[in-house]
Image: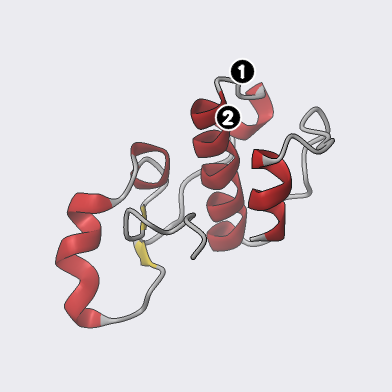
Amino acid sequence: MEFVDDFRGHKYINLEEPFKISNDKFDALLASTIEYLCHEQIINTPEWVIKVPACKKPWFVAGIESLKAITLVESPLEFRMRKIFVLENFLDRV
């Protein structure tokens, strides 16, 4: 969440250098988060982010069976494209 706060606070974040792909779930989660934040902040999404592949299997981040149906509906497009399902407030701070 510190990354999200820094991004939203316009602190310097180098988006030009891709991260090393090493874990299909977490790489897709990070790419989805970056893409979502770029759209939110009206910043061009780097090409390398768009090329990060989806998870091999759908991933319901909360891991709670009773939340699966609602995450299918609420997940932002940037996450759904990579088979990641979260609640709509996933990147919100309390």
Position above or below: 58 against 41: below
Q: Nearer the viewer, residue 88 or 33?
A: 88
Q: Is residue 72 left or right of residue 19?
A: left
Q: Residue at x 74, y 34 (%)?
A: 10
Q: Nearer the viewer, residue 27 or 22?
A: 27
Q: Amino acid at mark 2?
A: Cys
Check disc 1 and report its element: helix, strand or loop: loop
Q: Is residue 88 left or right of residue 26?
A: left
Q: Amino acid at mark 1?
A: Asn
Which residue does the numbered mark 1 point to in the structure image?
44
Position above or below: 69 against 38: below
Q: Quadrant of the N terminus?
A: bottom right
Residue 16, position in %: x, y?
80, 27
- Mark 1 surroundings within 10 Å by alpha-carbon count, few (fewer than 14), some (14 through 19), many (20 or more): few
Q: Is residue 31 left or right of residue 21?
A: left
Q: Residue at x 53, y 61 (%)?
A: 25
Marks 2 & 1, CB-CB < 8 Å contact: yes
Q: In the picture, residue 47 is in which quadrant?
A: top right
- C-alpha distance separating marks 2 and 1: 6 Å
Label tally: 2
- Chosen colour scheme: secondary structure
Residue 46, position in %: x, y?
67, 24
Residue 40, position in %: x, y?
50, 31
Which residue does the numbered mark 2 point to in the structure image?
38
Q: Residue furthest front?
A: 94
Residue 94, position in %: x, y?
49, 65
Check disc 2 and report its element: helix, strand or loop: helix
- Mark 2 surroundings within 10 Å by alpha-carbon count, few (fewer than 14), some (14 through 19), many (20 or more): some
Q: Nearer the viewer, residue 48 or 70?
A: 70
